[in-house]
Structures are given as C-alpha cells and as structure tokens.
Amino acid sequence: MSSTLRVDPIVCTGHGLCAELFPEMIFLDEWGYPVLDKRPVPAELLGHARRAAAACPVLALRLDRG
Amino acid sequence: MTDNIALWYAARATGLVALLLLTASMVWGIAGAMRSGPAGWPRFTVTLLHRNLTLVTVAFLGVHVGSSVIDSYAGIGWLDPVLPFGSTYKPFWLGLGAIAWDLLLAIVVSSLVRRWISLRVWRVLHWASYLCWPVALLHAIGIGTDSRGGWPLGVAVACLAAVGIAAMWRLGSSRRPA
Amino acid sequence: MTVRATARIRPSQAPGRLTGLFGAVTLAEHRQRYGPLPAADGPALIDAVRRAGLRGRGGAGFPTGRKLAAVAAGRRPVVVANGCEGEPASAKDRTLLGNAPHLVLDGAVLAARAVGAARVVLCVHRGSPRAQALAQAVASRPADGVAVEVAQVPRRYVASEESALVHFLNDGEARPTSVPPRPFEKGVGGRPTLVDNVETLAHLALIAAGGPDWFRQLGTDSDPGTSLVTMAGAVAHPAIHEISLGVPLGQVIELAGGPAQELSAVLVGGYFGAWVPVRAAYRLPLSHDTPPGGGPALGAGALVALPAAACGLAETSRVFSYLAYESAGQCGPCQFGLPAVADQLRLLAAGRLDPVGYRRLTSRLQVIAGRGACRHPDGAVRFAASGLAVFEDDVRAHLRGYPCAGVRYPAVLPVPHPRQIDGGWR
C-alpha cells in the first residue's frame, strides 16, 4: 500500500508551508502554488509528507493511502 | 485544601505569564494569517511558533487554574474555572477568566482534531480567539489585587498595544487573509 | 460574437437521424415523426445504450451506458440535461434544442426512467432565446412520473462543466467544485446525478426507439452513431452538419461547400481542442477517440476553418485571453497562470516577445496543466500549445519582430462580447 500526495486546488491558497517542509516532492510555481511529485512517497519520506500535510493552514494537502 | 501563600504567588505569576504568552500567540497567529513574519523565517516556523506558544499558554493556565483552586484562601471551587460567574470570590472577574479558558480550550481542541472536522467549523472557532484574548485581558486586569496600577498595568497596556496594532493591521489590510 | 444558431442546417446529407427530426417543434409533430415514447424498462434501456456504444456528445466522449449504470446504482437520482453550450464556437446544442426540443426531452425522460430518477433539470444559459420555448415545450408534455424543469445558468464558459452545474443547482454558484465526489456519486441535493449533454440524450431517445444494432450501422466500432458538428470559419456555407462518426474532416468541409479561400489550419474540438494544419486536417477522422495518427478528438464538435490570410497566433492569442478571463478564479495555477500566458501570447502576436520570453511561455504551459479543480486550464493550455506548434513558422517570424500581415485580418474565431458574459457566477 503506497501513499501519494494530493492537493485540493480550490482550498489551496498558496501559503507554501508544504514546500518548505517537504522539498523532496513539493516545489512552488512562480505564483506560490504547489507542484506535487505524483509518484508514491517512499517509505523513508512518509514522516515529512505527513508533517507537510498537517502543517497546511487550510488542510488542502492530503496524503492518500493506496 | 491548603492555605499557602506560595500557591497564591504561583497563581498570580502563571496568570501573568499566560497573558504574555497568549498575547504573543495572537500576534504570531495574525502574522501567519497575513503571510508575514520576520524576514527570512520560513512560513512553517511562524505557524509552529503560534501553535507552540498556545500550547505552552495552556500549560501555564493549567497551573494557574489548579493553584487558584487548590489555594482555599480565595474559596474558588473546581467548577468555577469552567462555569462562569458562580464563584464566591469576585464572581464577575473570575467568570471572565472562565469564559476565556473555555474559549481557549475549544480553540485548542478543535485545532488538535482539525483533520477530522470541517474547515468551516475550525475557522469559526478559531475566530473566537479575537473574543478569548480581550476577555482574558479584562480578567487579568480586573481580578488582580494589584493590577490596577504600576507595572502589572503597564504589562497589560503593552499586551493591548501589541494585539491591538496587529488586529488593526489585519482588519485594515486589503491583502486577502488566509 | 458566438456562432449564430440560425446558421443553416443541412439535413440533406446522408445520416439525418437527428436532423431528420428537425422542424418537428410541437409535441404532436414530434410524436408523428418519432413515434410514441418507448415504454422503457430501466436495466433493459441501460443495457441497450451500453450495447449501442453511445458516448457523450458534450466533449468528453465518456460511454453513456457506463454513466447510466453508475447513477442507477444510487438512491433517488436526478438527471441534468446540459444544454448550456458554453463553447463559443459551437452552436449544435442550441440548434438541436430549437429544432427538436421534444427529442431531447424524450431522451431526458427515458434517461430518468433508466436510472430511476423522478426529476429532470434542463439547463440553458440565462437569457437564452430558447428558454421560453423550452419551458413551453416542457409544459406541453404529460407529467408521466418525471418532473421536468428548466434552469437558467449564468453565461460563463465553465458554468456548464458538470460539477459547476451541480454546484449552481445546489448553492446558486456556477463554479466547478473539487472532485471526488463526482456528480454521479453525489450531486444535486447530495443525490447521484446524471449530467448529460442534450445531444447525448437525443441519441438515447433514438436508441430506445431504433435499438442498438440500428444505432451501430453508422459510425465506428468504438464510437458508433452520428454526431452534430458546427462547421464555421472560412467555408462557403458555415452550418451545423450531422456526420457519421469516423468520417474525415475534409468531408465536412466539402459538405459546407468547400473552403471559401485558401486555408492554413482547422481548429478541431473548439477552444478545448487543438489546431490541425490544413493538409492533415482534411484526412483527420472525426470521432471521440484520439485519431491513431495523432491529433485532437472531436470533442463537442466545434470546427473552425482558418484562412491562410489570417494569423493563427493572433487568433490563438485573442481566444486565449478570453479563456483566461473565464477562469473561475478558484485555483492558483489557472487564476494566475492563464493571464500570465495570455499576456505573453499577446506580445507574441504583436511581434514583441523575445526568445527568452518564449521559453518562459512554453515552460509555463507545462507547469499549469493538470493543477486545477476542473479541466479548464488543461484545455486552454492544450489549445495554446497546439497553436504554437502548428503555426511555428509564424512563431519564428514573430519572435524576430516581424508579425505577419494576418494580424490585421478580421477575427475568425468567435469570442463573446463582454456584454454577453454574465458578470458573476450566481
């Protein structure tokens, strides 16, 4: 069972905390919105992924299981 | 129940520190919502600092409430910190403290379970912080035996200035808030 | 100015399945030509549609039978008939609604019976000239267990996207929403909702009467049947035509009387589609499947022939600015990315963009797609990218500062006048 990053683009307002906390798989475009790596999150990076999702001020970033 | 001057000092001191911490948390919370902060600080540090300041505030308030109740000199019962205006000791000012404490608990608990509640519910509860903080300040000023003057009042004024300026900045800003 | 619905209809060409019923506007006339409403059994009708292989005619080409089955699995579903036609280059839906409204309504009622719905909402744009006539058509029908109503939706490009329609019917705001859940799971009133284009429903009515084997006599194996297309631009007789799916685009150009002047390219699939160079365009098979040789699918059937005397970059830029304006403004990449690209396309069309700016333009196109709640930015980006590819000779000239004379050619691709666009989303 793998986890992938997913963002609700309507809820997201481009705060950018996710990219700060998980630069391995998230970077911000020139307007401050996240571009996600769609591949499954490697097991060793799951902690960072969870922290990034928890830090989002509007909870737009989610970690999808499976 | 013990009757100990140390408890009274503890209650007073933790109350004052809690007010300072809560003020700092409000300012950092507003800064985060305004997407601002000290230059070079990553956004997540502003958010985490706001969160941790609030949690430490709760810890200090736990001691503040506990020592007030255990200290039987003032006759404050266990229910009085959560059920306002029922105490025999300065019921109005203590009641304000109970209201602030209740609001803060609601805000903190809702933030801890954010992932499982709707965003709108969380947001509405979080806006209650703009009610919680002034009520806490009034409680602090009104209930203290020596807070109507001198340096305690100065501290209260400083806190009022900090949050007042931050709130006016937020409410008056055209920038789309969080 | 959108393509006018009074563009001539040419029912004389072979199929005429839909167009053969055009003109029977009253219920009595329609019954005379089409016959009585088939007694529909839910699962049997869904099976017939599935075997017929009908695919959506609103652009996506999703298999209708599968959608029906998914909605039928839910409780107390609702049917939404999408007659908004937000695509400015398309006029087929309004033509169908104006000329054979009862065929569409039959299809909607049959779809409702198929999925077990008791409510049908027919959506058209606010202020549509057809709204009144449609309401009358609805009123003239017997109320046989299915309540049909007409809803008027704000005139915005993305307002007719399926989640936007559901959002409007629920909360009065015609903006797309995040999916999941998709409308077929949870839509109007929280109930499973079937959102189908009006032409799809018209074909459904034909399948119910004629059967799946008859339906499959025309079209291709994977995309059977006929489809309405809007042939506009530099052809002798711009009009709505009904084609057998799979025919080459060149046949439609000939049906339209041939090119009015020398062509450089054809836009296939409207503003959600892509440009095709004219020689390849003639050979391009029109269907909802991506052609094996590459190129765009038919989408909602909007075809515009571009004369060689016009400038493809100027046309692309003008339409893209419209698409950027029509963003619902909910998702950052679309809300900020599309206007940024629009600015650069304008500079490019004017010959004022340099190669560095061009590289930024192409990298922006890559970063915007796929990051919105709906497919609007994807479509806009695909449209722009196809323009840059097909008109690459023009791109080279424009980048050197020499825009072609075609930039002064009158506008070919229709774009609504700002006054024709509703100000808000409610």
Image: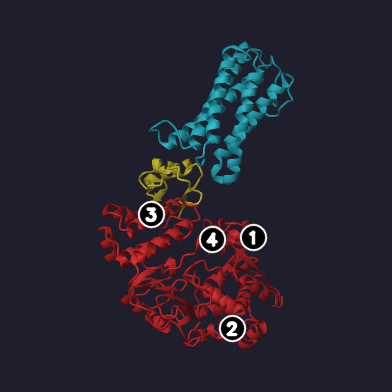
* Circle 1: residue type: Gly
Instruction: Write down the residue under mark 1.
Output: C189
Q: Which residue is mark 4?
A: C419
Colour red, chain: C
Asked whether A58 or C336 is in front, the reply is C336
Q: Chain of mark 2?
A: C
- Which chain's residue wears label 3? C
Q: Residue C116 placed where, x, y %? A: 64, 71
Tell us which disc is closer to us: 4 or 1: 4
Mark 1 Cα shell of 10 Å, populated few (<14), some (14-19), many (≥20):
some
Disc 2 residue type (three-letter): Gly
The CA span between labels 3 and 2 is 45 Å
* Residue B16 visible somewhere in the drawing: no
Give the mark nearest the N terminus, 4 or 1.
1
Q: Specify the colour of chain B.
A: cyan
Residue at figure coordinates x 58%, y 61% from the top left: C154
CA gap, disc 4 and disc 3: 22 Å
> Label 2 near label 3: C-beta < 8 Å?
no
Q: CA distance from mark 4 to mark 1?
A: 32 Å
Which of the marked residues, 3 or 1, is nearer the chain's N terminus? 1
